[in-house]
Image: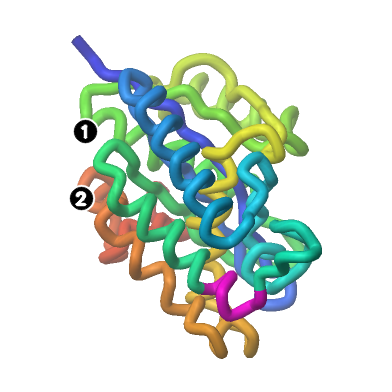
Amino acid sequence: MSDAFLAYIDEAEDEEKNLCVVTALLVPMHEWRVAFEELKKLRKELETTDYLYPGGEWHARDFVTGRGYISPKENPVGKARRAELFKKILHWIAEMPSMSVVNAFYPYRDGGRIQLLDTFEALAIGVNCTMQARDAYAILICDEGRDKNYRNVVRSLADAGKVERIVEDPFFKSSEHSYFIQLADFCGYALLRREAPTPIIQRYGSDQAFALLRPALVTAEIDVPDMDGLIRPGDFA
């Protein structure tokens, strides 16, 4: 019997550095409840050690750079500690045997044309390749905001016979209400800042955090030249 996966998808972009990442965090449906309970345990642990709000949104850019409140005002978490927690969360993802990560990595613009939808299209094909290799099927669950555009991309790919392992249109959910979309955001942001580090990111070593994800990265199943399985322009031409 074929397996089925939920593919949680989010984007990380840097227009100034002309970089765009779209990431899918893959969770097998039959292991979803276990993964969710383990994730709640992690959040509870960080509430105990660092007073992080257990139900708060983890938005990678804000989390790492020190913006917003991830804990009560009387128990602030400084940038150095946030960087440590960022790495801890990425390490946790890599250590979860049920989870795997697919990344598409494109220039944000090609001339004057924004390539976000191209990046998402490449990611969808990469997820499909992964499902083919695993004799499995996937449902895409994307962060809200680009619903119509992403839906049209997947329908076009389906009509062309390129994503026969992706079931239905993508579903959309606010990242605020999806712990797994937030984890996808962490993965994509780690890659973005490996390629385009900022001084604050380099100061605390977060530019090297993507390497922690290597055990979870889908590589051979996608069959692209990049050693980390990164899908780049032209890989599925």
User: Which image quarter holds the N terminus?
Assistant: top left
Residue drawn at 55 percent across, 68 percent down = 192
Residue pointed to by mark 1 = 133
Decide whether the magenta segment is chiefly helix, strand or loop: helix
| Residue at the outermost top position | 1
| Circle 2 residues within 10 Å: few <14, some 14–19, many ≥20 | some
Please provide percent x and percent y for residue 173: 67, 29
Point out the tag, 1 or 2, that comes first from the N-terminus.
1
Q: CA distance from mark 1 to mark 2?
A: 9 Å
Q: Secondary structure at mark 1?
A: helix
| Circle 1 residues within 10 Å: few <14, some 14–19, many ≥20 | few
Residue 211, picture quadrant: bottom left
Q: Secondary structure at mark 2?
A: loop
Above-or-below relation of 54 to 17:
above
Residue drawn at 28 percent across, 22 percent down = 136
Residue pointed to by mark 2 = 220
Cβ–Cβ under 8 Å for marks 1 and 2: yes
Give the amino acid at mark 2. Answer: Ala
Please provide percent x and percent y for residue 94: 32, 53
In-front residue for pair 105/217? 217
User: Residue 62 vs residue 229: left or right?
Assistant: right
Q: Start and end of the magenta stretch?
A: 78-83
Residue drawn at 45 percent across, 67 percent down = 87
Please provide percent x and percent y for residue 233: 47, 59
In-front residue for pair 31/77? 77
User: Residue 6 vs residue 68: left or right?
Assistant: left
Give the amino acid at mark 1. Answer: Ala
171 drawn magenta = no
Residue drawn at 59 percent across, 46 percent down = 182
Above-or-below relation of 42 to 151:
below
